[in-house]
Image (cartoon, coloured by chain):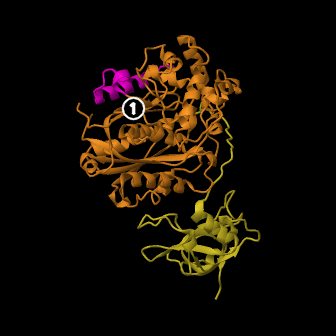
């Protein structure tokens, strides 16, 4: 780890749904922040700074919403920062917050991420044909489908690998009261028969459009020592970027993602991620990204990630549980989705993940990606203080 | 520079807003020709009401909002000689900060008056829109209160 010790003292999230018509954006973020403070058994006066993240402003049409959220997040008279890294923002926001503590600047930092997708339509906001730019062609799915096809061609993965990812995640979501999609009737057949949206991605293999927020309080070693409840120690963080377009760019297995994983493992003292990490929450908005990221993160050899899906390695009771909470496939308030991964990883090592807890999870990973698979944010958290 | 790339771009998709309990109550009040404000923990009356108290960080309770007058005083103003599309008038008018009687803060809205007649400290009142729907434009504008 780098800098001073830091730990997650408390976490909070909203019950994610398709439309929270009862609250404003301020009310939504406040709900998650109140829960994180309550979990950490702290009050607003205990917070030194606030770090906010969300996806591009166009998604709700509120320009720089952090300015008006200062009151709702108790930030008047305190430092407040906004982080912008597209879909990975929830992760990189948590990393920025942790660095403010690791750098010794603040004792306790509140970090919050959100999206209120019901206030507009992110898919069409991502589909605009800006002159002189490559169109994404009908949202994120249109952009990512050819990358998935590239993965299938290169790896020779069976075509139902994606169905099995969704089935696992949606069944996991039934154990998570905060997850958006709670489909008690889901079956392999229903997924396989759902409409094909962007070959090979079927409707059931896509993330929902959610309203939701997530929050964490990150504190120093001294702040952690005052807590009655378990904390999650931050063992390593990393953020990496690469351009959207570029000749020779491997969009199936992006270089920046591999670099990010190498760096976070090095910082956390991890040499064999599959053995040393007990479980991970990774950003999978379309089913096929689970096997792709298994390889990018070094949990599987290149071209073999799909085998861990097919043989149940990534199931809740498998050797390497992935997305125990139901993941982005069950809940996608875009800006918050990365932070939910980081938060769920923290709750796992705190032993506070509830019904989707992995028994004796000691080390967990949170992962987020954004843009055209070009922004990556990761952290490794542990139940014990880092020794490296 | 004659070789600059140029292309038209029209972008359109709908936005909606969930206003929440406080902003929602304020807007609903306007529909009923009532202006609601918040009696802040530091004693000041804030209009329009915030969703959270700036000093205690506590959520503002809609049920505790108080009504202030629909008349007040101009605390500052700026003349708009060339209105644009979407402005409340297609003729010159003023943007004004108005402190309604009973409130300690000012709110921004249009003021329909002759330029020479406008001054800081002048008394103005709300001109209500004929059809009110629970939106800020239910206040059509402010106008001189006379006397």
B83 lies above or below B35: above
Residue A249 visible? no
Label 1 lies in what chain?
A: A
- Which one of the lettered chains is coloured orange? A
Q: Which residue is situated farthest in the bottom direction here?
A: B147
Question: In the image, which residues are magenta?
Answer: A252-277
Residue identified by numbered label 1: A365
Indicate the position of residue A335 as horizontal and vertical percent values. Answer: 51, 42
Image x and y of residue A152, in percent: 57, 15
Q: How many marks?
A: 1
Q: Quadrant of residue A78?
A: bottom left
The shade of chain B is: yellow
Residue drawn at (52%, 32%), measured in percent from left and top?
A371
| Secondary structure, magenta segment, majority class | helix
In screen coordinates, is B5 left or right of A36? right
Q: Nearer the viewer, residue B82 or A342?
A: A342
Magenta stretch containing residue A202, yes or no? no
Label 1 sits on a secondary structure element that is: strand
Q: Quadrant of the N terminus of chain A?
A: top left
Q: At 69% from the left edge and 68% from the top edge, which residue is drawn?
A: B138
Q: Residue at x 61, y 36 (%)?
A: A126
């Amino acid at each position: 780890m780098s800098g001073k010790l830091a730990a997650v003292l408390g976490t909070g999230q909203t019950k994610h749904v398709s439309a929270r018509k009862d609250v404003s954006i301020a009310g939504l973020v406040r709900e998650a922040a109140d829960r994180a403070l309550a979990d950490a058994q702290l009050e607003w006066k205990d917070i030194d700074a606030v770090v906010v993240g969300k996806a591009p402003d166009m998604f709700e049409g509120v320009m720089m919403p952090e300015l008006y959220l200062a009151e709702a997040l108790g930030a008047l008279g305190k430092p407040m920062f906004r982080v912008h890294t597209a879909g990975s923002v929830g992760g990189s926001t948590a990393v920025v917050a942790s660095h403010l503590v690791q750098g010794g600047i603040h004792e306790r930092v509140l970090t919050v991420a959100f999206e209120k997708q019901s206030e507009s339509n992110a898919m069409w906001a991502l589909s605009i044909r800006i002159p002189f730019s490559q169109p994404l062609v009908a949202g994120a799915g249109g952009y990512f489908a050819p990358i998935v096809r590239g993965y299938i061609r290169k790896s020779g993965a069976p075509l139902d690998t994606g169905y099995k990812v969704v089935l696992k995640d949606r069944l996991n979501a039934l154990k998570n009261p905060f997850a958006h999609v709670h489909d008690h009737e889901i079956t392999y057949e229903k997924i396989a028969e759902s409409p094909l949206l962007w070959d090979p991605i079927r409707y059931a293999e896509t993330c929902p459009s959610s309203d939701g927020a997530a929050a964490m309080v990150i504190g120093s070693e001294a702040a952690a020592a005052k807590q009655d409840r378990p904390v999650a120690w931050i063992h390593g963080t990393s953020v990496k970027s690469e351009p959207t377009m570029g000749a020779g760019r491997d969009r199936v297995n992006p270089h920046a993602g591999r670099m990010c994983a190498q760096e976070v493992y090095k910082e956390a003292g991890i040499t064999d991620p599959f053995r040393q990490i007990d479980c991970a929450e990774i950003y999978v908005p379309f089913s096929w990204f689970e096997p792709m990221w298994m390889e990018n993160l070094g949990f599987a050899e290149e071209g073999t990630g799909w085998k861990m899906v097919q043989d149940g390695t990534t199931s809740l009771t498998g050797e390497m549980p992935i997305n125990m909470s139901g993941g982005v496939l069950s809940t996608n308030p875009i800006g918050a989705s990365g932070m939910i991964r980081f938060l769920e990883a923290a709750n796992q090592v705190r032993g506070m993940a509830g019904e989707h807890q992995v028994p004796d999870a000691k080390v967990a990973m949170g992962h987020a990606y954004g843009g055209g698979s070009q922004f990556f944010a990761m952290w490794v958290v542990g139940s014990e203080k880092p020794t490296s | 520079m004659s070789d600059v790339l140029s292309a038209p771009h029209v972008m359109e998709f709908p936005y909606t807003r969930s206003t929440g309990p406080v902003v929602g109550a304020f807007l609903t009040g306007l529909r009923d020709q009532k202006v609601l404000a918040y009696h802040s923990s530091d004693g000041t009356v804030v209009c329009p009401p915030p969703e959270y108290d700036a000093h205690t960080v506590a959520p503002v309770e809609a049920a505790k909002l108080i009504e202030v007058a629909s008349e007040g005083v101009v605390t500052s103003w700026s003349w708009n000689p060339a209105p644009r599309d979407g402005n409340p008038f297609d003729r010159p008018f003023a943007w004004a900060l108005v402190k309604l009687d009973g409130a300690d803060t000012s709110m921004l809205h249009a003021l329909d008056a002759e330029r020479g007649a406008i001054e800081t400290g002048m008394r103005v009142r709300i001109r209500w829109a004929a059809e009110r729907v629970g939106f800020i434009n239910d206040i059509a504008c402010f106008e001189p209160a006379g006397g």
